[in-house]
Amino acid sequence: MPIDATQPYDDSNIFARILRGELPSKTVYDDEFALAFHDINPQAPLHILVIPKGAYVSWDDFSARASDAEIAGFVRAVGQVARDAGLVAPGYRLLANTGLDSHQEVPHLHVHIFAGQKLGPMLAR
């Protein structure tokens, strides 16, 4: 169910629980700014989620409130995950949903990395 990204951060969300170690994840990257793991419901042959370690609801929330170090560290982590997975040459797609119209389902900023096949155009017309 889509969430309203203008609401306060809910620390009971699934990604907050993963960050606290309450739920398992198939981790592929972990540093002081970000955690990356395989999506449990993949939408492509390779589907990795990258989340910041801070409590941010959406990209909008993150870009407005995160420190410069958190922003740089998170963006670098997304790139490092893609490089580590060997995705630069064949290509990959990044997606960050924000709010109801985008169908954001978890109230914690997350970037999807999709790869492993030709992904085609973004929107069918």
Image: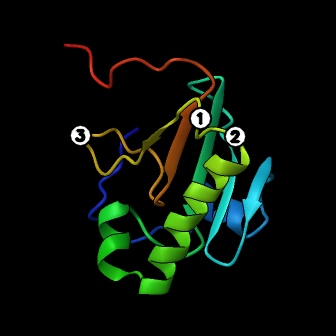
- Residue 61 in percent (x, y) is at 33, 70
Q: How many residues crowd around disc 1 within 10 Å: few (fewer than 14), some, or many (20 or more)?
A: few
Front residue (pair 120, 22): 120
Q: Is residue 118 left or right of residue 101?
A: right
Between tags 2 and 1, which lies in front? 1
Residue visible at 60% across and 47% down?
49
Between tags 2 and 3, which lies in front? 2
- Amino acid carrying label 1: it is Ala
Q: Is residue 108 above or below residue 20?
A: above
Q: What residue is disc 3 on?
A: 101
- Amino acid carrying label 3: it is Asp
Q: Earlier in the sequence, mark 2 or mark 3?
A: 2
| Quadrant (top left, top right, bottom left, bottom right) of the C terminus | top left
Q: Is residue 26 left or right of residue 4?
A: right
Residue 86 numbered mark, or none: 2
Cβ–Cβ under 8 Å for marks 3 and 1: no
Mark 2–mark 3 distance (CA, rounded to whole Å): 32 Å
| Picture quadrant of residue 19 | bottom right
- Amino acid carrying label 2: it is Gly
Front residue (pair 25, 37): 37
Residue visible at 29% across and 50% down?
99
Cβ–Cβ under 8 Å for marks 2 and 3: no
Q: Is residue 77 above or below residue 49?
A: below
Q: Earlier in the sequence, mark 3 or mark 1?
A: 1
- Residue 80 in percent (x, y) is at 64, 58
